[in-house]
Amino acid sequence: MKLTFLGAAGTVTGSKTLVSVGNKRILIDCGLFQGFKNLRLLNWTDFPFDVNDLDAVILTHAHLDHSGALPLLVKQGYRGPIYATPSTIDLCEIMLLDSAKLQEEEASFANRHHTSGHQPALPLYDTHDAKRALKQFKSLNMNRSLTVAEGISVRFRSAGHILGASSAEITAEGKTVLFSGDLGRPDNQIMFPPEQIDHADYIIVESTYGDRTHDKTDPVEKFAEIVNRTVARGGIVVVPSFAVGRAQELLLAIYRMKKRRLIPDLPVYLNSPMAIDMTEIYMRHCKEHRLSKEECSGMGSVAKMVRTVEESRQLDAIRFPSIIVSASGMATGGRVLHHIKALAPDHRNTILFAGFQAGGTRGARMVAGEKSIRIYGDDVPVNAEVISLEGMSAHADSDQVIEWLKTAPSAPKAVYLTHGEPGPADTLRQRIKHELGWSAMAPLLGQTIDLM
């Protein structure tokens, strides 16, 4: 068995690992690269393998850095099955279509306003490609083993990251390889903790927060302090948010803050049609998370749901204290860009980033303190308060990853660290080596490893 790391190696995004067993090929995840331009340009290159040789795709969860290149794979000729949990499929039915629509809209905007160096600007893929990809999805429930190619079986284990998120256990040639996917936190406010490791000869584990631990401060109380400070200035809190997982956790936090009277009863807007639909899916799958029916209802009703473009534009004219939650989470696209453009110049406002910001994204640059950010061809002054609320991350931190690894009944032959910048990945590698005594390494992008 061979593993070739084609994404999320030396960086957080673009998750893709090719598993080769004899003449059989399966792909674990197929995500978009995000962040620095040199990474995003990789999305425009052909896959470094013949898509016609693929026997199956295994998708750990719905976030676009894991699923967002599936329409591109289909566009380039893949016609085989894409296996995912039922909840992941529900989420992808919205996310992939939204991703395609967003790319079509951005290409159209660039052509109308001549903001692209390409004439004409084209979307990476379109709605037709996304719809074709969705037809190739096949449902696989948690903890059910399935042969996906001759001699290769897969079993999903709950990863606790977002709804439907799984770790993928691949068995072939008498060896078991466990891909963690994105691991959730045992203290996540919505999702249950990741399942313990059953057995693994090799483990591929994420290292997004490999060099840090999450703030132990109650994020709800910290969120409340930020809101109250902004309200006292007469400002607006803009929260760039991932539509899946993060938006729901933010709405739950706002519901709890209002219920505990930690913040005034100010208007709240969820300006992301996708996040609205995702919240409804979370409410339908109550058995898969911790929330009571009351909290599900509160999460779904605490905000005014903004669907239309006209309603979205009207939010930019608001001049009274309020909270606007809008996609995307790293300010790489979506409606939140219009809000940042309109509201970042005013010192009374707050731009609140709630989670990891990949290097090179607008979110990372604003959190780092840049005082001007380019949006749709204009340089926008950032006078608003910019703050990062990392306590709401849905990723396990360094300690939590180590504790999850410790649940393995025996030491694996090796651990490979992915989904991390070089610093965090290497810090976690050293912890695994020194604290657990296991062999660990962080593969390079494009590297192939033969599992003996």
Image: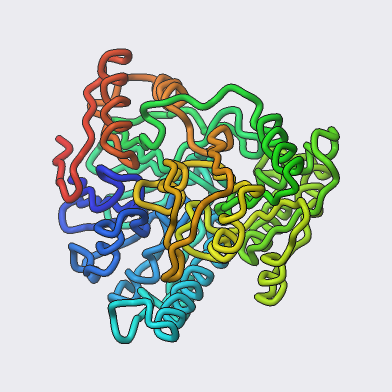
**On screen, 174 above or below 336?**
above
Q: Nearer the viewer, residue 17 or 370?
A: 370
Q: Nearer the viewer, residue 429 or 145?
A: 429
56 left or right, relative to 391: left
Location of residue 120 (image quadrant): bottom left
State the quadrant of the N terminus.
top left
Q: Is residue 398 visible?
A: yes
**Residue for point 48% across, 32% down:** 396
95 left or right, relative to 148: right
**Residue for point 29% across, 65% down:** 43
**On screen, 442 above or below 241?**
above
State the quadrant of the C terminus.
top left
244 left or right, relative to 111: right
**Residue 216: x %, y % from top left:** 58, 22
**Residue for point 78% across, 43% down:** 255
**Residue 373: x %, y % from top left:** 44, 57
250 left or right, relative to 133: right
Location of residue 198 (image quadrant): top left
Q: Nearer the viewer, residue 177 or 29?
A: 29
Location of residue 208 (image quadrant): top left
User: How was the colour assigned to the protein in this rendering?
Assistant: rainbow
